[in-house]
C-alpha cells in the first residue's frame, strides 16, 4: 500500500499536474483501490472543516499585505538603504540582497513574494557591477526563503494549526534562527568573495551622511513588523487581527508614498485572490488525502513503522532531515507540510522533542525545499525574473545556501536555546 501510494504520487507529479490536482487525484485513487466505502462522499465535509478555521483567515491577509508593499515602492527604497549599509562587506550587493530579504520577510510572511520583490529590484545590477551571476542569483533564491522563518509567516500558521501549537511562541522562536540564518548566508558570501575577489563585483562607496539619511527608508517596513508582531505580544490582537492591522498600515504607507490608486488596489486584490485560491485548494486537497490515508490505515501503518525502527532521538532527527530533503525535491512546501506533519509530529513529540523547537526545524527544512530542484519554487521565481540564462545557474548558486541551512539545523540540535530562549522568556 505504501509503495503504491508513493509511486502514484510521483507519477502524478511527473505528469505535470497542479499540486492540488495531484494530491486530490491521489486521494480519489487510494479511495478506489483500498477503501471498502466511498470516502469521496466526505469531500464536501473535509473541504468545509479544513477551511473554516479562523486562523486561516490570516493567510489571505498576509498575502494582501505583501502585495500592497510590493506595489507601494517599499522594496526599492528598502533595497537602496541596505546597499548603503552593507555594500562595503566583501560580496557587496549580495549582502544587500540577503538583508533586504530579511527585512521584507518580516512584513510579507511569504518566501515567493520576498524573492520576487527583492529580485525585481536587484537583478538589473548583476552585470552593471560585475558580480558572479550564479552566486548573486543564489542569494536571491535563498534570501527569499527567510520569508517563512522570520515572523510573521504563513507556513508557521499552518504548522500551528496542524499541531495545535501557540503561534505567538512560534513567532518568537523564529526570530533568532531567522536572523542567524541570514548571518550564515552573509558569512558564506563573504568567504566566497574573499577567496575569489572577482566574484564580489565593484565596490560601492557610500558616506556616513547617506547611510544615516537612508534609515528613513528602513523604518516603514520595521514599523509594519512592529504593528503586526507587536500587537500580538501586547495582547491587543490575534494573529489574524494583527495581519489585518498590517494591511491597514501598508495601505497608509502606500498612500504616503502616493502609490495608492484604484488601479493598484484592483491589481492587488486580483493577485491576492489568485494566490489565496491556490493555497486553499492545496490545503483542501491535502486534507482530503490525509483523511483517505487515515481511513485506509496508511497513517497508522507509517506511524507504527517509524516507531518500530527503534531509532534514538537524534537518529530519528537525522532520518527526518533526509526524508524532507528528498521529499522537498518533488513536492510543493504547503502540500508537503500538510501531508507529512500529522504523521511525523506525533512521533517526534513522543520522543521528547519540543513542539516549538521542532516547528522551527521543520520550517528550515521546508525552506530547503524552496531551493532544491526540480520543484524548488524560489528557483523558478528568480529564473522568471531573468531575460536570459538557464535554471541551472540559479540551482548552482543556491547549493551553498542549502549547506548553510543544514548547518543551522545542526546548531539548533546542539543548542536548542537558539529557538527556545525567546518563547521561554517572553512567551
Image (cartoon, rainbow, N blue to C red):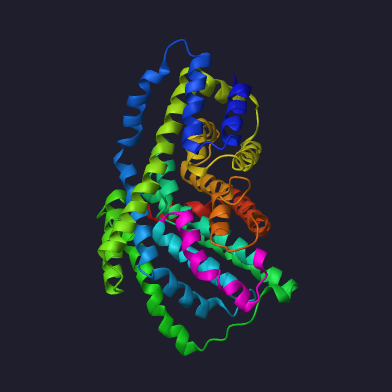
Residue at 48% in and 14% down: 35
Of residues 322 and 371, the one nearer the viewer is 371
Give above or below for 389 relative to 31: below
Of residues 407 and 96, the one nearer the viewer is 96
Judge from the rendering whether residue 40 lies leftward or rightward of residue 181; answer left or right: left
Give above or below for 26 relative to 364: above
Is 123 contained in the magenta span?
A: yes
Of residues 150 and 349, the one nearer the viewer is 150
Judge from the rendering whether residue 253 lies leftward or rightward of residue 107; answer left or right: left
Q: Position of residue 380 (x, y in %)?
A: 56, 53
User: Which corner quadrant of the image does residue 269 belong to?
Assistant: bottom left
Residue at 63% in and 36% down: 316
Residue at 33% in and 36% down: 51
User: Which corner quadrant of the image does residue 201 belong to?
Assistant: bottom right
Give above or below for 109 relative to 92: above
Q: Position of residue 387 (x, y in %)?
A: 58, 64
> Which residues lie in the magenta part?
109-134
User: Which corner quadrant of the image does residue 205 belong to?
Assistant: bottom right
Give above or below for 173 relative to 263: above
Q: Total label count?
A: 0
Q: Is residue 143 visible?
A: yes
Task: Specify the farthest residue to the right.
Answer: 195
Residue at 45% in and 60% down: 105
Q: Is residue 188 visible?
A: no
Q: Position of residue 188 (x, y in %)?
A: 65, 65
The secondary structure that most of the magenta stretch takes on is helix
Q: Quadrant of the N terminus?
A: top right
Is 355 contained in the magenta span?
A: no
Judge from the rendering whether residue 195 lies leftward or rightward of residue 188; answer left or right: right
Q: Position of residue 83 (x, y in %)?
A: 52, 77
Amino acid at each position: 500500500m505504501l509503495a503504491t501510494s508513493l509511486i502514484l504520487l510521483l507519477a502524478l507529479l511527473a505528469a505535470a499536474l497542479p499540486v492540488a490536482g495531484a494530491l486530490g487525484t491521489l486521494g480519489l485513487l487510494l479511495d478506489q483501490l483500498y477503501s471498502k466505502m466511498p470516502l469521496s462522499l466526505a469531500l464536501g465535509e473535509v473541504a468545509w472543516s479544513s477551511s473554516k478555521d479562523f486562523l486561516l483567515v490570516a493567510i489571505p491577509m498576509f498575502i494582501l499585505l505583501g502585495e500592497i508593499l510590493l506595489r507601494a515602492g517599499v522594496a526599492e527604497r528598502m533595497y537602496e538603504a541596505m546597499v548603503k549599509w552593507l555594500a562595503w562587506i566583501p560580496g557587496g550587493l549580495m549582502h544587500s540582497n540577503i538583508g533586504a530579504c530579511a527585512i521584507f520577510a518580516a512584513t510579507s510572511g511569504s518566501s515567493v513574494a520576498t524573492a520576487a520583490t527583492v529580485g525585481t529590484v536587484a537583478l538589473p545590477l548583476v552585470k552593471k557591477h560585475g558580480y558572479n551571476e550564479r552566486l548573486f542569483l543564489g542569494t536571491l533564491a535563498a534570501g527569499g526563503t527567510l520569508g517563512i522563518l522570520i515572523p510573521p509567516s504563513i507556513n508557521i500558521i499552518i504548522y500551528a494549526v496542524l499541531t495545535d501549537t501557540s503561534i505567538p511562541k512560534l513567532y518568537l522562536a523564529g526570530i533568532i534562527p531567522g536572523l542567524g540564518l541570514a548571518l550564515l548566508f552573509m558569512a558564506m558570501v563573504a568567504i566566497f568573495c574573499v577567496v575569489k575577489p572577482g566574484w564580489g563585483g565593484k565596490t560601492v562607496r557610500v558616506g556616513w551622511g547617506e547611510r544615516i539619511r537612508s534609515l528613513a527608508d528602513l523604518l516603514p517596513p520595521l514599523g509594519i513588523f512592529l504593528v503586526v508582531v507587536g500587537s500580538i505580544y501586547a495582547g491587543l490582537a490575534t494573529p489574524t487581527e494583527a495581519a489585518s492591522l498590517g494591511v491597514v498600515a501598508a495601505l497608509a504607507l502606500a498612500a504616503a508614498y502616493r502609490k495608492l490608486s484604484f488601479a493598484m488596489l484592483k491589481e492587488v486584490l486580483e493577485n491576492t485572490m489568485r494566490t489565496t485560491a491556490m493555497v486553499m485548494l492545496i490545503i483542501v486537497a491535502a486534507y482530503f488525502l490525509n483523511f483517505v490515508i487515515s481511513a485506509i490505515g496508511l497513517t497508522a501503518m507509517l506511524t507504527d513503522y517509524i516507531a518500530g525502527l527503534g531509532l534514538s532521538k537524534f537518529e530519528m532527527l537525522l532520518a527526518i532531515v533526509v526524508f524532507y530533503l528528498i521529499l522537498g525535491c518533488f513536492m510543493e512546501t504547503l502540500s508537503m507540510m500538510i501531508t507529512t506533519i500529522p504523521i511525523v509530529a506525533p512521533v517526534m513529540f513522543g520522543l521528547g522533542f519540543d513542539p516549538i523547537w521542532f516547528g522551527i526545524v521543520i520550517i528550515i527544512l521546508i525552506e530547503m525545499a524552496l531551493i532544491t530542484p526540480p520543484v524548488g519554487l524560489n528557483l523558478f521565481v528568480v529564473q522568471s525574473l531573468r531575460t536570459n540564462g538557464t535554471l541551472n545557474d540559479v540551482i548552482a548558486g543556491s547549493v551553498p545556501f542549502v549547506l548553510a541551512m543544514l548547518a543551522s539545523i545542526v546548531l539548533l540540535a546542539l543548542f536548542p536555546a537558539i529557538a527556545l530562549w525567546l518563547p521561554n522568556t517572553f512567551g
